Image (cartoon, coloured by chain):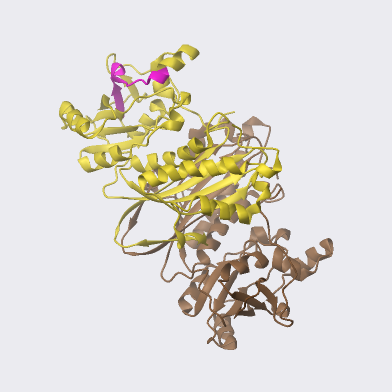
Chain colours: A brown, B yellow
C-alpha cells in the first residue's frame, strides 16, 4: 500500500506539525517517557547511576530504498527499530532508549504513519526499549524516511577487529534471498549476541547487513584472510528460490544479497567446535554454523576457498550509493 | 550553488558507498574518534566514568527546507551542528559526542559534501565535540539531508516547565527576520545557557526555533499566562528589513518567524532585574532583555499584552508540516 494519498483529509497535512506531534505522542504513549527524561523538552535527560560502558548507534529506513509500497507500514516500522537493535546485538549489548525522527511528504497518510509507529512500539515493548525523543520534519513530495538513534549498555563489548590467526569463523541463521521477505521479518539476534559476549571466547563480531562478501572483510586485520568452507555456508531457502529467477548460484546470493541481520563472529582457536555447538544448541533454536577459519597470509584477496586455497569469485555486496 | 550535478565525475556516484565512507572518515579525521569509541564498529562505545546526567538530542537539515541553493555548503553543515548545540544550550549542558548521518541523491557533488562536513568540523572543533559515528544512505534524485544525534552532559538541567507565577521572562539577542541570514550564521548560546544553569535562579529555559509566539506557550503550565511588554521585545534589524517587503509589522516577524536560536528563560520573582542584567553584562556581549512576567490566569489565551491585559493578535509560528 502506498504511504501517500492525494485525499488531503487522509494525510498528515490536515493535522499540521503541532497536532501531528501530539498524535505521535499519543500513539507512542505505551513506550514513551515523559519530559524531562523523554519527549517534550529540548533534549532527553538520561540519568546514569553507575560508571560503565554505553553504546550509541543510528540507522534509518527510506521509502523506495529500505522498503516500498509492497511492505505493510507496521513492518517498515519494525524494520527501523530491528536494524538498530541488530547493531547493539553485534556488540553484545542491551538496548535501552530510542529517539525516533521522521521526514515526510505532507501527503503521507496519517493512518499509514500510525501503523508505522505501531510496528516500532511492538518491537520496543518486546525488548523493553523506551522512546525518549525525536523530531518531525517535512520532506519533498513522495518522500518518507524514519530514523532512530538507539542507546544501550554493554558489560563486555565485542568489537570488530579483535580476531586472531587460527580463530574459527561462525554465522547464525541462514543467508541470502532476504529481498523475498527476510529483510522485513527478521529477528535481531539480541539474546544470541549477549550470550556470545558473556561466553568469553568470542574475539570479534558484526551483524551481516551488506552481505557476507562485503562484511566479512571488515572483521579481518592486516595479513588476515578468511579460509572458507563453501559447503558449510548456511544458504537460506529464499536464496534457492531467488536463484531460480536470477540464474545465479544460490551461494552467490548467500554471499552478496545482504540484509541478513545474522551475527558473524570468531571464536578463539582453543574452543572445541562441537562442544561450542552443543552449548549453543542448549540455549537457542537459532542455528549456528562454523564456516571457516582466520589464517595468516600475504594474499591480496581476503576470502579464500578452504578446499582449493584460491580466492573466491569476485562477488560484491550491496553498493548503497550507485550511479 | 546547487548541491547536485549531472556531471557524473563530480558526484558521489563515482565513489560508491565504500569509498564515500572512507572519504568522509578522512575529511572528519580532525574531530573523529577511531573505533570502538568512534567510527568503524557497529555502534560507538561510550565510557561513562562517573554517575551523572546526560543529554541526548537529534535534529537535521533538509535541502529545500532548512537551506537551499543560495546557502554555502559549509554554512549548511554549520547549521546542522549548531541546531543541535542550541538544544543542549537550552538545557544548560555541554555537548560532547556526535553521530552524523546523511541521506543523499547519488548525483550530489562530492566537493559540496566535503564543504558541508568542513562546516560541521569547524563548529565541532570550536566546542570540543567529537564525531563518534553515523550512517550514509541513498535518497531520491535532488534530495539531500544531514542528521545529527548529539550527546552531552549537564550538572543541573534547566527544564521547560518549571516556571512559577511571578517569574520574570527573558530573551537573549534579537528576534525576527532570520530568513535574511541569521538562520545560517547564528551562534548557539552555549556559554550563556551554561552560565544561566549555574546561576541557580533560572526556573525554565528553551531555545526559540519556531518563533516566540509558538515556543513561549510551551514554557507555560496550567493556569499560567505570559504578560508581555511589547515595547521590550528585542526586534532584530532583519525583522525591520523583512517588514518592508511583507508589509507586516516588525514585531509580528519577531514573534512568528522562528529560527532565532535565542534562549528564552524565566527567573525567580525574587531576582532583582537590574542586578541580574548587570551580572549578565559582565559575562556576555550578547544582549539580554526582560520581556514580561508569568501570571496566573484562567484565560484561554496564553500571551497577553501587559499594557492592556488583552490577548495578543493571533499570530502563528512556523507550521513545518503544511498542506
- The quadrant holding residue A138 is top right
Q: Is residue A76 above or below residue A155?
A: above
A307 left or right of B117?
A: right
B17 left or right of B317?
A: right
Looking at the image, which is closer to me, A71 or A321?
Answer: A321
Q: Is residue A181 above or below residue B151?
A: below
Across and down, in percent, residue A112 comes to 62, 43
Q: Is residue B313 visible?
A: no
Q: Is residue B236 magenta?
A: yes
| Quarter placement of the C terminus of chain B | top right
Q: Residue at x 47, y 41 (%)?
A: B119
- The quadrant holding residue B196 is top left
Across and down, in percent, residue A250 comes to 77, 69
Q: Which residues are magenta?
A: B224-239
| Quarter placement of the N terminus of chain B | top right
Across and down, in percent, residue B208 comes to 38, 32
**How many numbered marks appear?**
0
Looking at the image, which is closer to me, A238 or B103?
Answer: B103
Looking at the image, which is closer to me, B239 or A194?
Answer: B239
Across and down, in percent, residue B123 comes to 41, 42
Q: Is residue B265 above or below residue A245?
A: above
Q: Is residue B272 visible?
A: yes
Looking at the image, which is closer to me, A126 or B115?
Answer: B115
Amino acid at each position: 500500500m502506498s504511504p501517500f494519498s492525494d485525499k488531503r483529509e487522509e494525510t498528515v497535512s490536515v493535522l499540521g506539525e503541532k497536532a501531528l506531534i501530539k498524535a505521535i505522542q499519543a500513539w507512542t504513549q505505551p513506550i514513551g517517557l515523559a519530559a524531562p527524561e523523554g519527549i517534550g523538552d529540548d533534549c532527553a535527560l538520561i540519568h546514569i547511576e553507575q560508571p560503565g560502558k554505553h553504546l550509541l548507534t543510528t540507522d534509518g529506513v527510506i521509502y523506495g530504498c529500505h522498503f516500498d509500497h509492497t511492505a505493510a507500514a507496521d513492518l517498515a516500522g519494525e524494520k527501523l527499530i530491528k536494524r538498530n537493535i541488530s547493531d547493539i546485538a553485534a556488540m553484545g549489548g542491551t538496548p535501552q532508549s530510542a529517539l525516533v525522527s521522521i521526514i515526510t511528504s505532507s501527503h503521507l497518510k496519517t493512518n499509514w504513519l500510525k501503523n508505522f509507529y505501531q510496528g516500532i512500539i511492538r518491537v520496543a515493548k518486546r525488548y523493553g526499549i523506551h522512546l525518549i525523543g525525536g523530531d518531525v520534519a517535512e520532506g519533498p513530495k513522495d518522500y518518507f524516511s524514519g530514523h532512530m538513534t538507539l542507546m544501550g549498555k554493554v558489560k563486555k563489548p565485542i568489537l570488530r577487529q579483535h580476531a586472531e590467526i587460527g580463530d574459527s569463523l561462525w554465522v547464525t541463521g541462514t543467508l541470502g534471498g532476504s529481498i523475498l521477505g527476510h529483510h522485513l521479518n527478521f529477528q535481531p539476534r539480541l539474546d544470541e549476541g549477549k550470550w556470545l559476549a558473556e561466553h568469553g571466547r568470542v574475539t570479534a563480531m558484526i551483524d551481516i547487513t551488506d552481505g557476507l562478501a562485503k562484511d566479512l572483510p571488515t572483521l579481518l586485520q592486516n595479513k588476515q584472510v578468511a579460509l572458507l568452507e563453501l559447503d558449510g555456508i548456511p544458504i537460506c531457502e529464499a536464496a534457492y528460490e531467488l536463484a531460480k529467477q536470477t540464474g545465479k548460484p544460490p551461494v552467490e546470493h548467500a554471499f552478496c544479497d545482504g540484509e541478513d541481520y545474522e551475527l558473524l563472529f570468531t571464536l578463539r582457536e582453543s574452543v572445541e567446535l562441537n562442544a561450542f555447538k552443543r552449548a549453543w544448541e542448549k540455549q537457542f533454536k537459532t542455528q549456528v554454523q562454523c564456516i571457516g577459519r582466520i589464517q595468516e597470509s600475504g594474499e591480496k584477496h581476503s576470502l579464500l576457498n578452504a578446499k582449493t586455497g584460491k580466492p573466491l569469485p569476485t562477488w560484491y555486496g550491496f553498493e548503497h550509493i550507485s550511479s
